[in-house]
Image: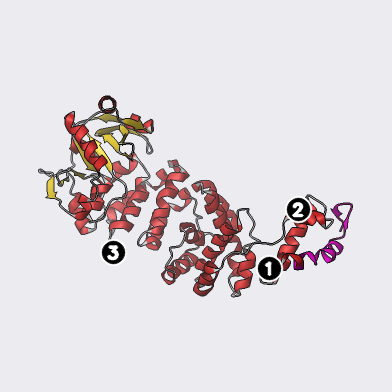
């Protein structure tokens, strides 16, 4: 524990009886509590769930902390014939029992981080609740909750929560160096908790800037997991700019000369839509050219959908910006490069319309039911179309003719265009001769 870190003399700060607190109790949780009581180990709700309950929000995920070691938990659950699942977290003290074959609970032994490398920690198990609270990132995430409603707060997390203040537990420099991802977690929780746009502690920002190059050591997947939540939360625009001011850009894949003006324009359009923007619809506004989208993907390791969405927006935003005909956007659903179903391509185009702020076109395209192209590839063989690449070219040309008709032409009407197409394409011996 840090020598100069002041803890609350009496950690008990509240006794809860709220609806949010009562919502966590299920028959399975009662069974879990009974097991720990039977074997005389302490068990409490830990971290984010306590924070959410204090905000009168029903927590989506609940983590538990205990004085029992992983070995003691395994022995206890084995005696009670309780199945354990997902043993990957045992090294760091997490055991996951499945109660009544209905509900899994992640239970972690109280611990101290002995050594850290900015990403991972070597841990020592303890029975001291204050020592465990001391290793946590933010004061608002360092509280515990007993099942009688008692809130245990060693480092004034409840005070900070009431003030809507985001503060590290103890020395920010030490906390950040333990795991550099905490830089992004600071901004994410600012967006969740703070009630004013720019109420950061100047010293905290200075320490973040000093340690910002540590993000280089964090995997792209972990960075993107936090960054997308920042973009989706309150003050997303301002928090991303603050991150860039701290020097984060080059370590998270954002170009040095990010397009801040475009980013501001796109963010300002979010208020015109009921549906949230995809995080990458917003982030892509910072990019100036397709090469930067490739670099961003290499750093953050997007899913296929996210990668193709980013490429699509950056490649098409200028060309399509002044187009206000819904038919052209419908036709684009069948022409987007990069693979994927027409339904997925429609999602790309809907995001592009959000990007532009074209609300009417967005609503019209969203309500549009994608028609089924009436021609099948095997039909073309019956009309003398060669198999292979030539068939693909003919199908694409027929699809263009069909979309030009506002998707109205029938199978027979499309087939009637084949002689003209064969002649135009100059197909000889199964090949297109130019």
Q: Residue at position x 42%, y 51% from top?
A: 248
Q: Residue 403 — which label?
A: 1
Q: Give the SS element for disc 2.
A: helix
Q: Residue at position x 45%, y 70% from top?
A: 269
Of circles 2 and 1, the one toward us is 2
Mark 3 lies on residue: 196
Q: Give the SS element for disc 1.
A: helix
Query: Which one is in front, 171 or 120?
Result: 120
Q: Which quadrant does the N terminus fall into?
A: top left
Q: Give the SS element for disc 3.
A: loop
In the rendered image, the vertical position of residue 220 relative to residue 101, given as above or below: below
Of circles 3 and 2, the one toward us is 2
Q: Quadrant of residue 191?
A: bottom left
Q: Position of residue 326 (x, y in %)?
A: 59, 73
Q: Earlier in the sequence, mark 3 or mark 2?
A: 3
Q: CA distance from mark 1 to mark 3?
A: 49 Å
Mark 2 lies on residue: 378
Q: Earlier in the sequence, mark 1 or mark 3?
A: 3
Q: CA distance from mark 2 to mark 1?
A: 21 Å
Q: Which quadrant does the C terminus fall into?
A: bottom right
Residue range (magenta): 413-434
């Amino acid at each position: 524990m840090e020598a100069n870190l002041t803890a609350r003399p009496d950690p008990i700060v509240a006794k809860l009886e709220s609806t949010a607190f009562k919502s966590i109790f299920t028959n399975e949780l009662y069974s879990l509590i009974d097991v720990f009581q039977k074997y005389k180990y302490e068990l409490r709700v830990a971290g984010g769930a306590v924070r959410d309950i204090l905000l009168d929000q029903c927590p989506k995920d609940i983590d538990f902390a205990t004085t029992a070691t992983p070995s003691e938990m395994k022995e206890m659950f084995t005696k009670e014939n309780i199945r354990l699942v997902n043993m990957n977290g045992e090294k760091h003290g997490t055991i996951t029992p499945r109660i009544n074959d209905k509900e899994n609970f992640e239970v972690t032994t109280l611990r101290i981080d002995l050594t850290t490398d900015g990403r991972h920690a070597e841990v020592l198990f303890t029975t001291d609740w204050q020592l465990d609270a001391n290793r946590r990132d933010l004061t608002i995430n360092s509280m515990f909750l007993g099942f009688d409603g008692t809130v245990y707060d060693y480092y004034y997390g409840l005070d900070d929560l009431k003030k809507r203040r985001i503060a590290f537990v103890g020395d920010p420099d030490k906390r950040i160096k333990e795991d550099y991802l905490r830089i992004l977690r600071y901004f994410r929780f600012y967006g969740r908790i703070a009630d004013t746009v720019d109420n950061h502690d100047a010293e905290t920002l200075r320490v973040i800037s000093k340690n910002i190059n540590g993000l280089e050591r964090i995997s792209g997947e972990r960075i993107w997991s936090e960054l997308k939540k920042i973009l989706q939360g309150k003050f997303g625009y301002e928090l991303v700019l603050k991150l860039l001011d701290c020097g984060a850009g080059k370590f998270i894949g954002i170009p040095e000369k990010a397009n801040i003006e475009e980013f501001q324009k796109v963010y300002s359009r979010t208020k015109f839509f009921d549906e949230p923007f995809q995080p990458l619809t917003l982030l892509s506004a910072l990019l100036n050219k397709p090469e930067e989208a490739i670099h961003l993907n290499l750093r953050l390791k997007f899913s296929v959908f996210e990668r193709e969405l980013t490429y699509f927006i950056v490649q098409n935003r200028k060309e399509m910006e002044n187009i206000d005909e819904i038919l052209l956007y419908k036709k684009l659903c069948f022409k987007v490069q990069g693979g994927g179903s027409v339904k997925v391509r429609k999602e790309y185009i809907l995001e592009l319309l959000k990007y532009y702020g074209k609300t009417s076109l967005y609503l019209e395209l969203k309500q549009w039911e994608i028609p089924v192209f009436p021609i099948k590839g095997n039909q073309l063989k019956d009309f003398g179309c060669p198999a292979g690449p030539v068939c693909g070219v003919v199908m694409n040309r027929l699809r263009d003719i069909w979309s030009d008709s506002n998707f109205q032409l029938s199978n027979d009407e499309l087939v009637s265009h084949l002689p003209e197409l064969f002649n135009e394409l100059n197909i000889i011996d199964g090949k297109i001769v130019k």
